[in-house]
Structures are given as C-alpha cells and as structure tokens.
C-alpha cells in the first residue's frame, strides 16, 4: 500500500472507526449539518445508481411498475392500522405549520402561529398508509388485481444514534407495494421478492446472505410475516439487508380497499410490501473492504478499469496515448467502464493510492519501456496481486479477470461467513462466544420471553428462522422447554 494511505485505521484495531473513516476518505458520503442526515457524494451515489438500475431491472422482470406517492402523510392515516402506528410513532417527524415570518426585530424568522395546519402531517417513515389510501381509488374488481407498484424515494425516521449508510434519519430506498385477490398470491409475491433481493445481493453485490422469516417480535409493524436476508459483516455482526412483508388484509381493512371477486362478492385485498435502502452501501463496504480501502465487486464499481501511464518525454507520452486508445475502445465495446488517467497534476503514487482506496477492480500501468517490450502491468484490487501481461489481447484478458474478481470476492465472503456459523445448544457457552461475533444456530421455544432474555443478557437478537438449514428436534438452551425451531441468533447493526 502506498504511504499516502497509512492514515486509515486498521480493522483489527477499531472496526467501527475503520468503517467511518473509509466512508469519508473514499469520497462516498459525509455528515450533513442537518442532524442525523448525510450527504452522499458523487462517487458514492454512482455506486447507488448502479444498484438502483440493476435492481429496477429485476423488479420489472417480475411485472413491477414504478410510481410516486406523496412525501407528506396525514397523521390520521397512521392511526388506522394499530400495530403500524405503534411501530413507527417514536420515529416520526411531524409538520405542524406551513409558513414562517420574520420576527419583530427582523433578525431572523419564526413559525407563524396563524399558519398552523388543521391536521398535522408526517414525513413518510414508510408509505403503506398513503399508498393503500390511494389503492382504494384504483381497485374495484378482481380484474384490477394484482396491483404491483414500486417507488424510489427518501424516507425519514428520527434516529437517535446514526452512522453513515447504516442508520441515518433520512435515507434513500425503494419500497414495493402490492395488492392481490388471494392470500396465496400475496404470500407468493412476498417470497418472490425476497429471492430477488437474495439473488441481487449474491450475484451483483457478491454478498452471501441467509434467507429466513422473522420472529413475531422482529416483524415489520403491521405484518403477518416478515422475510429477511441477513448478511455477515467482517466483524461477525449481522446486517439486515432487505425485507419482504406479507401484510395479510390488515391495510385492506384499515383503508377499506375492497374488490368484487369472480363470484361478485366483496373481499378485502391482500397486501405485501418490500424494500431495500442505502444500507446496502454499508453492507458492500463492510463485507469486502480491507485496510487499504474499498474492495468493490466489478458489477457495481463505477470505474471497473483504470489505466495509468508513466510519464516520460513528450514523444513517449504521445506514444503511450496512441497505444492505449484502441484498448480503451475495446473495453468500452465490451461494456466495461474504463478511465484513462493521464492528468499530470498528481504523481503516479498518489493515483495508485487513490484508486486503491476507491476500490477500482483492475489497474493497468504502462510507460515507454512497457511499449518497447509490448507489455503492461496489471493489478487486481481484490488480492493486490500484480503481473506483467502482453499488451496484445489485454482487453479480453481484463474482461475475464473482472469475472474472476467478482467470483473471488463472493467466495471469500462466503468462506468467511460459513466458517462463522455455529450450532450451539448451551446458553453459558453461547453468552461467551457471541461476544466475538458469528451466526449461532440455536433451538428456541418460540416465546417472546426467551427472546427478550437473550437480548437483555447478550445484546444479540433472533435474526430469523433460516431457510436452507435442517430443522431438528431439540430443547431451548435458555428455558429448557421443547423447541419450535432452530433459529439464527447474532449481534447486529
């Protein structure tokens, strides 16, 4: 690593500090002067844009259409679904007035008391209420169903403790909302979207995830079932990376969304909602990055290849420029994003350090001597390995290398994750080991009391009843009662 990056705290010394420094120093985001909010910088937003574009394509393949709904929600809407309002009440930002006026000394502005709203408005913490109030006007017959919409937007949840990307008061996300004629169709959609998220996480983000269903305590407010994907960060903590909710007929009843079925009988519509947010940026950073900076999977890297010339005499520089031009064209024709950094305002060492910090997957370096030899230096960011390759055919080699990097990053994360999943049925042992991180498969008696005790004693929570793991009979490690399931327990963000 170049000396220019020695300021980045090592993960082994302080993982939290390493993360916070990396987000800022890699030009992803920074704190805003608005409490709890962040500024996503162009490089960070470029990664989010790629996430958004690739996710949106996957949504539309399943029949989803995008729409947009109001930012402000009448307070009375939230109160119509009891569990929903209880779940979000403490996080709501409330608009009470619609106008300011200058004060008597004209040295500032104050709220105009005459401009108090008749009904207070909530800045959306999520949109089930405003959307289902709208669905009431769109749904009349079974022929109007299913109704499958999504919106890309921002939401506000008044967080007391914030961390860039992982937990901020305002964040960006997508929220899908669907209405169906039958319970079976709604449940199928909720599970379908979970699989879309899991596939995106693993195939695009190179983040291995565990799919499962949440306990009743951990469900989304107003849901009958919440499905989740849980990712393991390099410190062994879990990060909930996407959720899909089966809402039953709760919102259909709350907003009187009825339709006439094929027998001409009135029924309440069945609902789902599902979403992922800029928290995925945190997952991306904490799953792959190292003490040198970001490690980005090629499918999400804004710049997949950077080419850096080593300077010389003007005629040598011109020769390098001419040699690089067709390579750049070949890479771009392959759909590979490439940057040729021939600016003379930074030394090569600074450029190397900067692109390493920002996680550019492949770096090509060449100068006059390389041209004479017909070679180029290739460095892959995931392993920091360098090799000298023939200049001829380098574009095709880079294409193959990018695919290899994508797979290697995923396999490395999966190997780490799998090595830190443990079966544990002894509570004393669990309380000691969970401090060091990891996913623990433990028998659970299904009670909220046991769940609460685990959280109180260890700060760990039941992440989900996982799919893909064998469910064997057993005894709850806390209560000694017969278990209803083996669940995944971990400390989390």
Image (cartoon, helix red, strand yellow):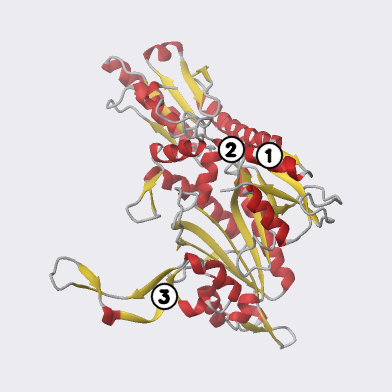
Mark 1 or 3, nearer chain start: 3
Badge 1: how crowded within 10 Å, few (<14), some, or many (20+)?
few
In the picture, measured across the screen, residue 124 lies left or right of residue 492, that is left
Q: Disc 2 on helix, strand or loop? A: loop
Q: Disc 3 on helix, strand or loop? A: strand
Residues tagged 1 and 3 counted as in contact (Cβ below 8 A): no
Mark 2 or 3, nearer chain start: 3
- 1 vs 3, front mark: 1
Residues tagged 1 and 2 counted as in contact (Cβ below 8 A): no
Q: What separation in Å lies between label 1 and label 2 (alpha carbons)?
A: 16 Å
Q: Which residue is mark 2?
A: 235
Give the mark count. 3
Task: Name the residue at 78% across, 43% down.
Answer: 426
User: Where in the figure is residue 163, as x and y percent of width and height?
Assistant: 46, 48
Task: Name the residue at 49% across, 80% down.
Answer: 76
Q: Which residue is mark 3?
A: 121
- 1 vs 2, front mark: 1
Badge 2: how crowded within 10 Å, few (<14), some, or many (20+)?
some
Q: Is residue 299 visible?
A: no
Q: Which residue is mark 1?
A: 432
Mark 1 or 2, nearer chain start: 2
């Amino acid at each position: 690593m170049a000396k220019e990056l020695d300021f980045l705290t090592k993960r082994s010394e302080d993982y939290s500090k390493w993360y916070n420094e990396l987000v800022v120093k890699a030009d992803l985001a920074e704190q805003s002067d608005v409490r709890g909010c962040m500024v996503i910088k162009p490089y960070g937003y470029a990664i989010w844009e790629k996430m958004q574009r690739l996710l949106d394509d996957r949504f539309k393949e399943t029949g989803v259409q995008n729409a947009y709904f109001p930012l402000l929600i009448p307070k009375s809407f939230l109160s119509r679904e009891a569990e929903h309002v209880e779940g979000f009440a403490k996080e709501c930002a409330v608009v009470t007035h619609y106008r300011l006026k200058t004060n008597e000394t004209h040295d500032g502005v104050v709220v105009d008391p005459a401009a108090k709203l008749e009904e207070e408005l909530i800045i959306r913490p999520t949109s089930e209420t405003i959307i289902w109030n709208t669905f009431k006007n769109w749904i009349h017959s079974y022929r109007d169903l299913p109704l499958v919409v999504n919106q890309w937007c921002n939401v506000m949840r008044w967080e007391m403790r914030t961390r860039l990307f992982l937990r901020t008061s305002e964040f960006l996300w997508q929220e899908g909302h669907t209405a169906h004629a039958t319970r079976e169709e709604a449940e199928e959609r909720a599970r379908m979207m979970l699989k879309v998220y899991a596939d995106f996480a693993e195939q695009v983000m190179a983040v291995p995830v565990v799919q499962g269903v949440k306990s009743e305590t951990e469900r989304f407010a107003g849901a009958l079932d919440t499905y989740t994907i849980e990712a393991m960060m390099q410190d062994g903590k879990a990060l909930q990376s996407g959720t899909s909710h089966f809402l039953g007929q709760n919102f259909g009843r709350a907003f009187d969304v009825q339709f006439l079925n094929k027998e001409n009988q009135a029924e309440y519509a069945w609902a789902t909602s599902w979403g992922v947010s800029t928290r995925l940026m945190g997952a991306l950073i904490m799953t792959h990055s190292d003490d040198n900076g970001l490690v980005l999977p090629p499918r999400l890297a804004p710049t997949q290849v950077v080419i850096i010339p080593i300077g010389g005499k003007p005629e040598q520089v011109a020769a390098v420029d001419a040699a690089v031009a067709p390579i750049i064209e070949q890479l771009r024709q392959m759909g590979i994003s490439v940057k040729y950094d021939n600016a003379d305002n930074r030394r090569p060492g600074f450029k190397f350090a900067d692109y390493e910090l920002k996680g550019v997957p492949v770096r090509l370096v060449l100068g006059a001597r390389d041209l004479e030899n017909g070679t180029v230096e290739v460095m892959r960011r995931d392993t920091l390995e360098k090799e000298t390759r023939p200049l001829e055919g380098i574009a095709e080699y880079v294409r193959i290398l990018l695919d290899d990097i994508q797979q290697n990053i995923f396999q490395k994360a999966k190997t780490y994750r799998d090595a830190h999943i443990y079966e544990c049925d002894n509570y004393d042992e669990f309380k000691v080991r969970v401090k060091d991180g990891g996913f623990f498969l433990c028998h659970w008696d299904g009670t909220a009391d046991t769940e609460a005790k685990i959280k109180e004693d260890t700060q760990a929570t039941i992440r989900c009843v996982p799919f893909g793991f064998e469910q064997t009979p057993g005894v709850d490690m806390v209560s000694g009662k017969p278990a209803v399931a083996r669940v995944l327990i971990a400390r989390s963000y």
